[in-house]
Image (cartoon, coloured by chain):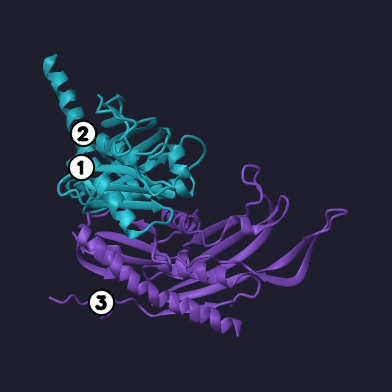
Amino acid sequence: MLSDNKENETQSIRTLSAELSNLSRPDGSAIVAQGDTVVQSAVYGPVEVRPNKELPDKAYFDIVYKPLTGLPGCPEKLRERVIRNTLEATLLVNLHPRKSINLILQEMQNDGGLLACCINSACMALMDAGLAMKCLVAALNAVITTEGDVLLDPSLKQEEEAKACFTFAFESINHEVITSNTQGSYSETEFKKCLEICRSASMKVFDFYRECVQRRFSKEIDR
Amino acid sequence: MVLERSDGRDCWKTRRTIINVGSIGTAYGSALVRRGKTTIVCGVKGELANSRPENPGDGFLVVNLDLPPLCCPLFKPGPPSEQSQSISQFLNDIVTSSGCVVLSDLSIEGQLVWCLFVDIICLEYDGNVIDAAVLAMLAALTNTKLPKITVSNDNGEIKVSEALEILAVKSQPVTTTFVYQQDGGHVMVDPSFEEEYDAAGILSITLQEDGSLVKLYKPGGLQLPDSVLEQCIAKARSLSKDMWHLLKTVSETVET
């Protein structure tokens, strides 16, 4: 499953590829690659909840982020929190009171835009699990280079050399901002420019989601 | 309809901020910040260390925020919670993004560098710990005086002199946090504990004195229209001015 690939253009995203339901045990799973950044995610839910986590009005949304090596530290915890809050806003957690929805993310390869890839991978896994969501989310990464140019979906090297780095997540209805996280210092106009570029690129991610799901179900009908 | 907040504040009004610097004698620099009832103590301690081979001459600055069970019934004893770890990371990001302390300034001689520990403890949690922690961190760093270290050329002996040197703080990042209760509506600045607990989303905007943005942090929650985002940035600009004025007044009163 491939989307359009124009790697040399600065305003296009790297090749997106994904495989849904690649794991047999979870209720939903997805492995998503954005260029060389790869994240595997799996969803179990709604399942039995631990008594101390039980919420009377909604499902408890638990998320575990596994880094490539070592134990999760402060940066991973921040990432985990951002991913959880982003997806919890889209999930209809009120449909499953006293239950738990568990999402596990495993970083497979990091070549820049890890947070964005995590959010996209998690969203596809939730979609694959068939959990009711009010909208989808697409996350994009962009940097401002030291020359002041905007570079969409950069590699890790470009990210490290950049003046400022942005990650945005948009919802699929009005394409408004759900999540924003930035590094480095930048002006308000630079911020708005990046936001708009990422917003228009988010359409490509939503199209990709649609294509993935269509292909997956058309295969099953063919059989 | 005019929204009335539980403490009678206007939506765009922050609580009273009090900064007290240098109150901890055993630390190289310290600050106590109160934002309404939220109380944060920050201390800066230094240790001598060897720099990493990949960044020779660069010192270390480690910010750590602790949310002990003392400050709020929601926090349990044990290892640091996800919340405190993510705020710690947020603070570390602000230091690197704004460059308020340049790591090469922490070099002493050759491999020898300072490793500064900025420990922030919340004593009372009444919402908006992020703003107060950033303020406390900045006030403590501005207040930090490190002893002068000399290394003798003959035997490499390290001497700590009585003379103190002021730590150079290059910029002043200030964070303003907003919460909103529903899709872009009812935006409130400087949330109290209840407002933060019930919020549909939270937005933290960090600005520098030259007008540049350092961090625009919105960790999920409900979506926010661009118009509201712009309104919040503009509001953060005007509210940050008061904080810079406050920080300036504080540092002036200490020096004289």
Whether marks 2 and 3 lie on the same chain: no
| The colour assigned to chain B within the rendered structure | purple
Measured Cα–Cα span from mark 2 to mark 3 = 43 Å
Measured Cα–Cα span from mark 1 to mark 2 = 9 Å
Q: Chain for mark 1? A: A
Residue B239 percent coordinates (x, y): 35, 74
Q: Which residue is mark 3?
A: B6
Q: Is residue B115 visible?
A: no
> Residue pushed farthest right?
B154
* Type of the residue with mark 3: Ser
The foreground one among A151 and A216 is A151
Badge 3: few (under 14), some or many (20 or more) residues near its Cα, within 10 Å? few
Q: Which chain is cyan?
A: A
Q: Which residue is mark 2?
A: A209
* Type of the residue with mark 2: Tyr
Whether marks 1 and 2 lie on the same chain: yes
